[in-house]
Image (tube, rainbow, N blue to C red):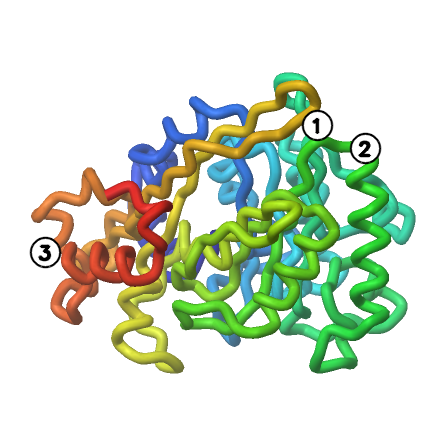
């Protein structure tokens, strides 16, 4: 979820900020476990709102209220924007969700001791464990505070090293001893791409070898494939869900195709059951979610594809640039394997 400048400008004119999530709210209220990626800092009175100037993000506290209204159980806060507002931003984001919601945040920490805490939820008799990692942060973290953001590679190294793998293996093995289902929330890959890079694939297979059950990826801002990997143990990998929340109609550093794909994301639902201590993951569906805003950069709302009417289609800010129902569905069919397609 990436709340950007155009959204803040438009939402000031809206009578009901909650209307933004109106068409997707039931997906969250009807399930038992909702997981998301919170890619903006939640600020406080000392931090100025920033919707992306110099690629830095800091949301007002009411955005935290809006996100909490969706009834998320878990949010990853480990991403390249986690340190955009430095130490104060880490503190304010953690404190906001701790003090104003029941949401469990994973991947950023206020103290070294917090990094040792296991993130576990018991839902309907199934114990879920969570870890989150990012490739790094846009703003450099000074060495004494590197513990504050969970990294999958040392910030001084361009590659994932053996010591990085050993550190993550230790964390995963400790968590797995306490849970039935292990879920990793990964901020990885290359922005504005439809396919995972080699690092994503290598890490996915490494995590599979450790018995991880589900990997949920983000960072590309475009949807990427979903697949089962592994022989002895099966891991469900979402390489990237794309953008659930975004509000940028023109990104100069990419092309028209990826500017259009920036406006859509995936919401995936699945069933997890436990019988005789065996876990089964089944009934996987994917719903396309459209980031809608009109030609005046107003009326922001999230719309599932099956509710994306011709009126919404032709009035979208990027319709004249080719963002239409055909582009949306063609992209979905080209990127997402048929076994995970819902239409």
Instruction: Describe residue 197's horizontal placement relative to residue 212 as left or right.
Output: left
The reply to whether discs 2 and 1 touch (Cβ–Cβ < 8 Å) is: yes
Q: CA distance from mark 2 to mark 3?
A: 51 Å
As drawn, the residue found furthest toward the front would be: 232
Instruction: Name the residue that disc number 3 marks.
Output: 314
Residue for point 68% across, 41% down: 182
Instruction: Name the residue that disc number 2 marks.
Output: 178
Instruction: Describe residue 114's horizontal placement relative to residue 67 as left or right.
Output: right
Residue for point 42% across, 37% down: 284
The reply to whether discs 2 and 3 touch (Cβ–Cβ < 8 Å) is: no
Lower position in the chain sequence, tag 2 or tag 1: 1
Lower position in the chain sequence, tag 1 or tag 3: 1
Q: Percent position (x, y) of residue 179?
A: 75, 32
Q: Percent position (x, y) of residue 103?
A: 63, 34
Lower position in the chain sequence, tag 2 or tag 3: 2
Q: Closest to the observer: 45 or 200?
A: 200
Circle 3 crowding by C-alpha within 10 Å: few under 14, some 14–19, many from 20: some
Q: Percent position (x, y) of residue 318?
A: 20, 65
Q: CA distance from mark 2 to mark 1?
A: 8 Å
Q: Closest to the observer: 251 or 262?
A: 262
Considering only vertical position in the picture, is 201 above or below 14? below
Residue for point 84% across, 49% down: 115
Q: Nearer the viewer, mark 2 or mark 3?
A: 2
Instruction: Name the residue that disc number 1 marks.
Output: 127
Q: Percent position (x, y) of residue 337?
A: 35, 54
Circle 1 crowding by C-alpha within 10 Å: few under 14, some 14–19, many from 20: some
Q: Nearer the viewer, mark 1 or mark 3?
A: 1
Residue for point 17% across, 71% down: 321
């Amino acid at each position: 979820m990436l709340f950007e400048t155009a959204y803040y400008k438009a939402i000031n004119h809206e009578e009901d900020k909650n209307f933004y999530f109106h068409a997707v709210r039931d997906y969250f209220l009807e399930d038992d476990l909702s997981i998301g990626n919170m890619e903006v800092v939640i600020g406080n009175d000392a931090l100025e709102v920033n919707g992306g100037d110099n690629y830095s993000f800091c949301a007002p506290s009411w955005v935290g209220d809006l996100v909490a209204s969706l009834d998320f159980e878990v949010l990853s806060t480990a991403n390249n924007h986690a340190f955009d507002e430095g130490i104060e931003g880490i503190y304010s984001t953690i404190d906001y969700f701790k003090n104003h919601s029941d949401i469990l945040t994973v991947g950023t920490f206020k103290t070294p001791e917090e990094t040792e805490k296991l993130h576990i939820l018991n839902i309907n008799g199934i114990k879920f464990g969570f870890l989150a990692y990012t490739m790094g942060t846009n703003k450099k973290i000074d060495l004494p505070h590197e513990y504050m953001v969970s990294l999958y590679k040392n910030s001084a190294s361009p590659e994932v090293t053996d010591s990085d793998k050993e550190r993550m293996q230790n964390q995963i093995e400790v968590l797995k001893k306490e849970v039935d289902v292990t879920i990793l929330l990964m901020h990885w890959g290359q922005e504005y791409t439809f396919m995972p890079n080699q690092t994503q694939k290598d890490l996915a297979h490494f995590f599979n070898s450790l018995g991880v059950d589900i990997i949920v990826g983000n960072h590309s801002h475009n949807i990427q494939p979903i697949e089962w990997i592994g022989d002895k143990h099966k891991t469900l990998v979402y390489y990237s869900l794309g953008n659930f929340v975004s509000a940028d109609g023109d990104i100069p550093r990419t092309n028209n195709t990826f500017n259009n794909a920036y406006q859509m994301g995936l919401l995936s639902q699945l069933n997890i059951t436990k019988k005789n201590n065996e876990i089964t993951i089944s009934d996987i569906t994917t719903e396309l979610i459209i980031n809608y805003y009109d030609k005046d950069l107003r009326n922001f709302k999230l719309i599932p594809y099956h509710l994306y009417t011709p009126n919404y289609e032709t009035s979208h800010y990027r319709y004249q640039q080719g963002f239409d129902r055909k582009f949306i569905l063609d992209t979905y069919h080209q990127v997402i394997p048929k076994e995970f397609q819902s239409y």
